[in-house]
Structure formats: C-alpha cells, structure tokens
Image: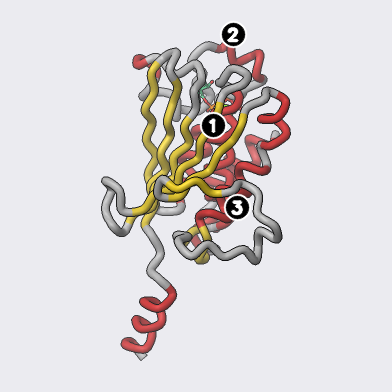
Amino acid sequence: VHRLIDLQKAQSAAAVLNAERLSVLALVREAIVENQVNAESKHISMVLSLNGKQKLVHVEGAENAVDRDDVFINADHETIKTAVKNLVENAINYSPEHTTVAVGVAVGIGSGDDEVAIRVVDQGIGIPESSLDRIFERFYRVDPARSRETGGTGLGLAITKHCVQDCGGTIAVWSREGEGSTFTITLPQAKSEQDEESAKSETA
Ligand code: ATP
Ligand code: MG
C-alpha cells in the first residue's frame, strides 16, 4: 500500500509545483538515516562522500549544519528523497551482511559543471546484464523467488524513476553479477544564491 501511495504521489504533477532549493547533502543524509535500522540489522555500513571527500552521515543539529562545499538542486523535497531512499533500500536489501553501501554526491565530474550526480554504490549480488533494461519496469523483479525473501513488490525502481524524472533528472544503472551495482541520479545544479540574486536584480 505504501508503494502505491508513493506511485500515486510520483505521478501527480504537484511534485513540480513544490520545487524548492534543497541541500543535496541534507537530502541524502535523510535518505540514509531512514534506512539505518535495516542496514544495522545486516551490519552494513553506510558512508557518504562529496566530490570524493568523506562526509559524516550524522551531524549534530543537521538542519543547521553548514557544509561550505555543499551543492544544491531545485526539486520537491519528498519526491527526490523517495527516489534516493528507494535506491539505498535496494542497495541494503540486495547486499550480503558486513558490506558497505556508499552514497556519493559529485558535481561537475564527467556530466558537466551544471549537473549534480547522486550515486548509490553497493557490493551486493548485482543484476544480470539481460535484466538491466527491465528493472525500472513496474513489478519487474530479477528473481521473484529471491525477491520474495526480501518482500519486494517490484515497484520501488519504477517509482524512483518517476520521481527523478518529475524533478527534471535522469537515472542510470551499472551492475555486474557478484560484484555489485551503482545507480546514478543526475539532476541540474541550482544556481548559487548570489547568481540567483543578481539574475533577479537584472530582470527587475
Ligand atoms: P520494492 O517494491 O519493495 O522496492 P523490489 O526491490 O523487488 O521491490 P525494485 O526496487 O523495483 O523492486 O527493484 C526491481 C528488481 O531489481 C529487484 O527485485 C532486484 O531483483 C533488482 N535490484 C534492484 N536494485 C538492486 C541492487 N542494488 N542490487 C541487485 N539487484 C537489484
Ligand atoms: Mg526495491
């Protein structure tokens, strides 16, 4: 039922209307923390990095913490958080115990200066090549018998793709069986606050 509600929300155009300037670090921290219990029960450690530099997952008074090198996007908060949360959830579900799930935020690497990449990297079971272009379909699961163990409905990635597209982004996957998977969300970077101010005063 939760999945269907997520899907319903993801499909409503309202998501676009609530676009606001969001800290990407704050956003991915929320997505990680909401999966914490699951990760701990499998002894999976979750790490966070920004442009290759390690960041703390937990910061005191997270709302007030300022990272000087933080990056920003314009998106609906719940929508984009759902997308990242689902990827972290899968990374944990489809990994063996005592592995690491890494969330990496990067700007201006490969994709260009004005794009933000959010990567979720696991050391899990991976996805066979023949399934890679189907996993974003509704109800598609690589191995239904295996997925039954994790209680999957096969809707998570369909919802995630919707959410990302609603926020003006794209999603891509790399995976190799037995090695792990990497899901990458790419979104346009929001202008710096200064640039936004000067753009406003120019049009005024
Ligand atoms: P749920 O709706 O609860 O998320 P689900 O996890 O089965 O169910 P999706 O999240 O849409 O559904 O994922 C679809 C399928 O893709 C999964 O069943 C699994 O086979 C495969 N998959 C997704 N993410 C990963 C991953 N990180 N590693 C390995 N396989 C994955
Ligand atoms: Mg899932």
Query: Label 1 sits on what residue type?
Result: Val
Residue for point 29% across, 57% down: 113
Q: Is residue 62 above or below residue 124?
A: below
Where disc 3 sits, the SS reads helix
Residue for point 50% across, 40% down: 103
Nearer the observer: mark 1 or 3; the answer is 1
Q: Which residue is mark 3?
A: 78
Provide residue 66's location: percent of width, then percent of height.
57, 65
What is the spatial separation of the Cα atoms under label 1 and label 3, in whole angstroms?
Answer: 22 Å
Q: Nearer the viewer, residue 175 or 42?
A: 42
In the drawing, does residue 130 fall left or right of residue 93? left
What is the spatial separation of the Cα atoms under label 3 and label 2, in whole angstroms?
Answer: 31 Å
Query: Label 3 sits on what residue type?
Result: Glu
Query: Label 2 sits on what residue type?
Result: Ala
Where disc 1 sits, the SS reads strand
Q: Which residue is mark 2?
A: 145
**Residue lying farthest to the front in this orientation:** 53
Residue 165 in sight in this render? no
Q: Quadrant of the N terminus?
A: top right
Mark 2 CB lies closer than 8 A to ligand 1: no
N-terminal-most mark, 3 or 2: 3
Q: Report the coloring of the rendering.
A: secondary structure
N-terminal-most mark, 1 or 3: 3
Q: Quadrant of the C terminus?
A: bottom left
Q: Which residue is mark 1?
A: 101
